[in-house]
Amino acid sequence: MSDRPQVGLAANKEVRERDVAEEQLRRLTEFAEFHFRELNEPTSWDQPPPRKSESEAKLVEFAQGLDALIVCHGAPRITGCILDKAPRVKFVGELEGDRFAQRIDAEACWERGVKAVDTTHGSSFGVSEWALAMGMIGLRNAGYHFRRMINHEVSYPTPQARLEDPGYLKSELSDRTVGLIGCGHIGRRLLELLRPFRVKAYVHDPYVPREIADIYDVTLTSLENLLRLSEVVFCLAPITPATRKMIGKKQIELLRPGAVFVNVSRGAIVDSEALIERLRRNDMIACLDVFDPEPVPLDSPVRDLPNVFLTPHIAGVNARGGPRFFELMVDELARFFHGHETRNDLLPRTLANRTGAPSPAR
């Protein structure tokens, strides 16, 4: 066998055909040998795959000759038992798993000195862009005007109506105060996109290191402060036991009159009934790519509210997102096998975030 690093991907056929672009495969094979093993276990974005001895045996057989093992949909979870039977493996990675590497036992990797990385944030690029777009749509009250126009209605029946339009009063994003609930990959990319607008940014995220505040020139604060102070609020947090229904009636009432609330993360983070109740007062605007439940029920009142702009969970789902998972993984493999530090390690604070436990990051 070649003395070049042996890198293997265990996943279903769809992942191989959809996400492993030839350009990135050429990059990988400049410094390593690539192997693929098709596995077809039931898969989920939110839960680890169930343990099956037959499937794990296939993964062990595949991994024994590898230096790096990458998993995605269709593969079983990489456990300590699997790593013990494939001692050559010193790098494991997950291509997609809703940000938290459901197919890797990170603690087992740490105990064995195996590098564990997660490039599921490949979809964060599109999500951050759509968050920015929705913030601007909300400030312009564009959802309302779109509804009026496609219904063949006049947006401004009187000159005074224009002057009272939230889109006229707020309109521009520049120099506004924004709040980011969650500041992981999506949040940090959004902060980069917001720089030209010279916004003042508040961030609530108990799992980010304090250095983030200095690097991005933001103020870390409580959820309550953020909701009270921000003109545009971006919900970017992952769904975990700690964030489910985190934004309830009490929190929604803290939003200032005229605020724009953008949710591109998960609908279940917000109490949908409480949000609809506030929106019915027509003193704020919501731009929602996600909702609870999904898809948005056809008879849900949120569909009819003039101060709501809706999209069907499209922010992170696009043709570029899937291949980017593998592109980012090739970046990590190149760093690892050339003696550099990787960027997307699974860390104790990653697991704390997943379970809602106190963060060791600070």
Image (cartoon, helix red, strand yellow):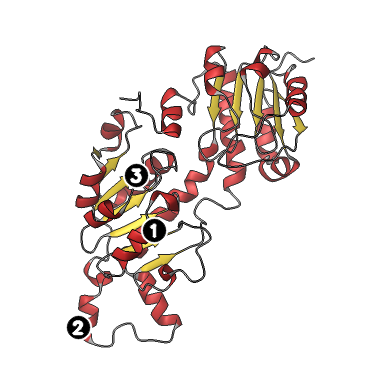
Residues 44 and 120: in front is 44
Q: Secondary structure at mark 1?
A: helix
Q: Position of residue 49 (x, y in %)?
A: 64, 35
Residue annotated with mark 3: 191
Q: Secondary structure at mark 2?
A: helix
Whichever of labels 2 and 1 marks the residue nearer the N terminus, that label is 2
Rounded to the nearest angstrom, the CA distance separating label 2 from label 3 is: 36 Å
Residue 272 is marked as: 1
- The structure residue drawn at horizontal position 61% and vertical position 45%, both measured from the top left corner, is 322
- The structure residue drawn at horizontal position 70% and vertical position 13%, both measured from the top left corner, is 85
Callout 3 environment at 10 Å: few (<14), some (14 to 19), or many (20+)?
many
Instruction: Kindly check if marks 3 and 1 are in contact, taking CB atoms under 8 A apart as contact.
Output: no
114 vs 126, left or right, is: right
Callout 1 environment at 10 Å: few (<14), some (14 to 19), or many (20+)?
some
The reply to whether residue 67 is in sight is: no
Residues 29 and 69: in front is 69
**Which residue is outermost to the right?**
1
Amino acid type, residue under disc 1 in the picture? Ser
Rounded to the nearest angstrom, the CA distance separating label 3 from label 1 is: 27 Å
Rounded to the nearest angstrom, the CA distance separating label 2 from label 1 is: 33 Å
Q: Secondary structure at mark 3?
A: helix
The reply to whether residue 243 is in sight is: yes
Q: Position of residue 304 (x, y in %)?
A: 41, 74
User: Disc 3 vs disc 1: which is toward the camera?
Assistant: 1
Instruction: Kindly check if marks 2 and 1 are in contact, taking CB atoms under 8 A apart as contact.
Output: no
Relative to residue 107, is residue 323 depicted above or below?
below
Residue annotated with mark 2: 160
